[in-house]
Image (cartoon, grey):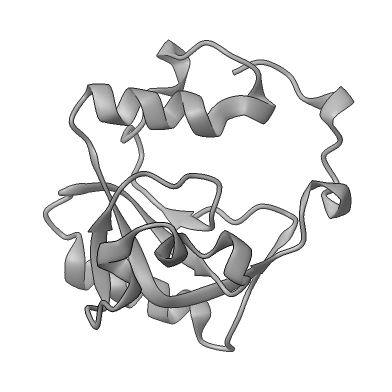
Amino acid sequence: MMVDDDEMPLGKNWTEYAIKLWRLYNSDRKYVMMVGRSALRAEDVTQHHERLKTSRIEVEEMPYWWGCPYMSYRGAVPYGEMKGRADQQDPVVEAWARENGKKQALCMNLYYNHFGLSFSQVQPALYGSF
């Protein structure tokens, strides 16, 4: 499980619920990653994909939307094979996933708030390469 320093999971049982969803929907590892859903409308992935706007399903397979709190498993994404700056990893990983037929899922009721890069402890000048 990974959550950036500028993201705040919402709900006192967020971690337990995330683990429950992971075990229930991804025991077969069909998803390379399962992500949380932003409580901020501008960042809510369901606003950008018609099929997700009216979904009542707890976990939805979806187009890639990286940079959210997510769950994955060791070795799911071969970061050592990728080239690029660490602050641009989202589009690099997304492109790799599409090229390799990997799937991602959105946890429809696993909300978080994103405060944005200006509130992050990691400043762009400090980013390295991955």
Residue in the picture at 79% in, 47% down: 117
- Could you say which quadrant of the image residue 128 lies in? top right
Residue 127 location, x and y as percent?
77, 25
Residue in the picture at 68% in, 29% down: 87
Asked whether the viewer can see residue 22, the reply is no
- Could you say which quadrant of the image residue 99 lies in? top left
Looking at the image, residue 67 sits to the left or right of residue 22; the answer is right
Residue in the picture at 45% in, 75% down: 110
Quarter holding the C terminus?
top right
The residue most toward the front is 50
The residue most toward the bottom is 12
Looking at the image, residue 124 sits to the left or right of residue 52; the answer is right
Residue in the picture at 82% in, 40% down: 122
Residue 45 location, x and y as percent?
45, 60
Q: How many marks?
A: 0
Asked whether the viewer can see residue 116, the reply is yes
Q: Is residue 122 above or below residue 89?
A: below
Q: Is residue 116 above or below residue 90?
A: below
Q: Is residue 31 above or below residue 78?
A: below
Residue 50 location, x and y as percent?
31, 63
Residue 125 location, x and y as percent?
88, 24
Looking at the image, residue 6 sits to the left or right of residue 3; the answer is right
Q: Is residue 90 above or below residue 23?
A: above
Name the one closer to the observer, 71 or 36. 36
Looking at the image, residue 114 sits to the left or right of residue 24; the answer is right
